[in-house]
Image (cartoon, rainbow, N blue to C red):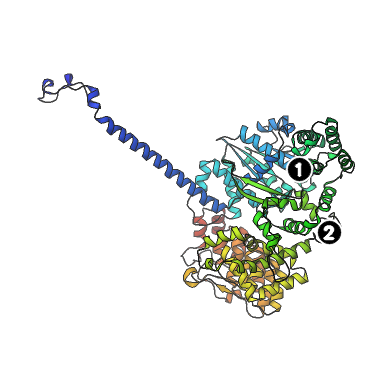
Amino acid sequence: MLSSPSNYRHGSFHAELLPSYSLNSCAQPLRPVRNEISASNETHQASLATIREIRSDDQMRQLKNILSPADPATNYHKTLKQRHPDTCKWFLEDERFEQWKQSKSPPALWLHGQPGAGKSVACSAIIENVLLTMRSSTCLVVYFYFDFSDASKQTLEAALRSMLYQLAQQSDKIFQTLSAPKDKYAMSDSEVRRALESSMAEIPNGVVILDALDEAQPCKEVLAWLTESIACVKLRNTRWILTSRDYVDIRRALIEDPDRVSPVSLQADLVDRDINSYVDARIHTDKSFQRWTNRPDDQSLIITSLMEKSCGMFRWAACQLDDLAGCLTLRELKNTLARLPTTLPETYSRMLQKIPPARIDGAIRLLQFLMLSPRPLELGVAANILAMNIEGDTLYDTDKSLPDLSELALYCPGLIMIVHFEDPDDGECYREELQLSHYSVKEYLLSNEVHEDFRVDLSTAKASSMATVLLLRSFVQWSQSLPADLVAQERGARRRWMKDNFPLAEYATYVWTVFATEAELQDGTQQYIVDFLADQSRLNCLLDCSNFFGSAFRVGPMYIAVEGGLLQTATALLRRGFSSRVQHSRREEEYSGWKDSPLAAACRNGHQEMVNCLLEEQFRTGVDDFWGAATAAARQGYCHILELLFEKVPHWRNLERPKTQSPIHVAVCCPSIDVVKFLLDKDFDVNLTDVFGDSPIFRACERADIAMIQFLFDH
């Protein structure tokens, strides 16, 4: 700041000798500079913010890769769309829900009801309410939907990974803890569990909402974790809402302590209010019922007839409305109302009978896939499935291709549905999938209640055999259809071509062994699988496709059978003289001679029968890759597999040990105290160093695993 010249004195200079300037005139020349500095500073701050955002986004992507979380938001938005306005108010305005939100005991509410009662839709309404009224910087909300149609959303570990990722998205502290630099590509299940529990224990308030516990696999693991967590003192600030069917094992596990879990029944009379509102709205607003607009008596007849038999089943009422929408005359309407089915299985049997003869083969094929597939079908995949032939020299029939994929659901209306996944920000649809329309549909297809005309075709044996043969043939079709000019191009170009022209190939790569696990029990299909793998030209088609979408190495028939868990196929290949020894090696210059064996693959997958089969075969020729197999089992924490290995190979001490990692090095990183204890009992040294000069104790210290460090020092 410049002082006034009239008062300025400095040395021998006198104010009169200085020119006279006003404060404004002094500051005037500096303004452009000051503005430039200010602009530069703003640009700098914006750049820093951008860098932080980019860094955070990059860290979040890294965390997502480490956790591999399933996305429950797709289920949330799908079921929220199915909710009719003003439904679920009976619960949202209930005093028990209000007290629960105010952190009054008990900490958990369990909503239970019969199949088709609308539990998942109610769960989405609850999530929406909780997100709007409770979520804040001091109250974190996580949710998860166990999903019968998607194997990646059925396990406890899938739920824990998803919830931990959601916490990291909402809490900077949790995010920074999880995104700290780690020399690993993934977190083990035990690490995820510990991280989630410690994160939940630190937050001031938390809400966990889990839908469809009965669709979890295995359900007992989820129930065990829930009962332990709800009772945990460290998680006393966490509130819980759970939904499921009212099964005995679930009820017994959850309400053992009524002070912790309060059951809330979706009673028929309560749900019927919502059903009545839904039916009334469809009758008066749905274009399919416009023909009855000026006939209130007929409208009332529909509503009354449905409400008399709905018995709290939302799903049943919706199915009947879909059927009634096609009635053109009052006589037809009355006849349909007079013979309404009384149960969901009866409803589904009638849907099968109404499939037009021209579409019956395609409908059965789609149902065969959907009833056993570990994940929904992308529309392109479903279309390819319909066009594939499972017999004859012609693999693919273009005459059976659908011009409009949005019409796939017309093959069996009511039993299957197309789900549109939209970006919540811009509403753009980024994926479409074909699914069974409800969990009860899958149960029906897998039951003995299937209509007798369809019982054979929809049996598990027939469905799995058909799907296995079709998917194996699809590898040959993939190989033959790939344009020659794309073979030498980079993988991205080929993948884009394949996604547009034959997406079934990628689906087949990941799921064919899922179908084959059941199909190989049928003699004819097992013979087809063995013949396919034993035929080098056809095997190359499978390997080329698998290498294209997955791992970049070549393997033999035995490795494929073992990796896929195909015990009967592996046994048949052994009888044909195929070796179970190390069968492949990645390119030396690129992969440093990495190798694996069928035995190691069986141990890694925890397939005890397969391990036993391979050990018995190798007992005659000498065990191959014992240490690789033991290390694979230790890494997964499979103590029972290790016990089998050491029992079947009593001379293991005489086998040359690896120069890289030993089983105990990977065991302390699992971490599994039982596995480490087993290895220590076998005289493994806790001071043994690996190729990097690290000991098991160093590995445990590096991971800050206090329990493991203490255990190792005690031994």
Where is residue 570 shown, x and y percent of the image?
Answer: 69, 72
Residue at image mark 2: 455
Helix or strand or loop: what does disc 2 sit on?
loop
Helix or strand or loop: what does disc 1 sit on?
loop
Where is residue 69 shown, x and y percent of the image?
Answer: 59, 50
Vertical placement of residue 557 versus 455, above or below: below
Q: Residue furthest top?
A: 6
Quarter-wise, where is residue 603 in the image?
A: bottom right
386 and 329: which is toward the camera? 329
Task: Report the side of 214 relative to 420 (left or right).
Answer: right
Vertical placement of residue 69 versus 121, above or below: below
250 and 426: which is toward the camera? 426
* Discs 2/1, front: 2
Residue at image mark 1: 256
Q: From where the camera sits, is residue 221 visible?
A: no
Q: Which mark is residue 634?
A: none
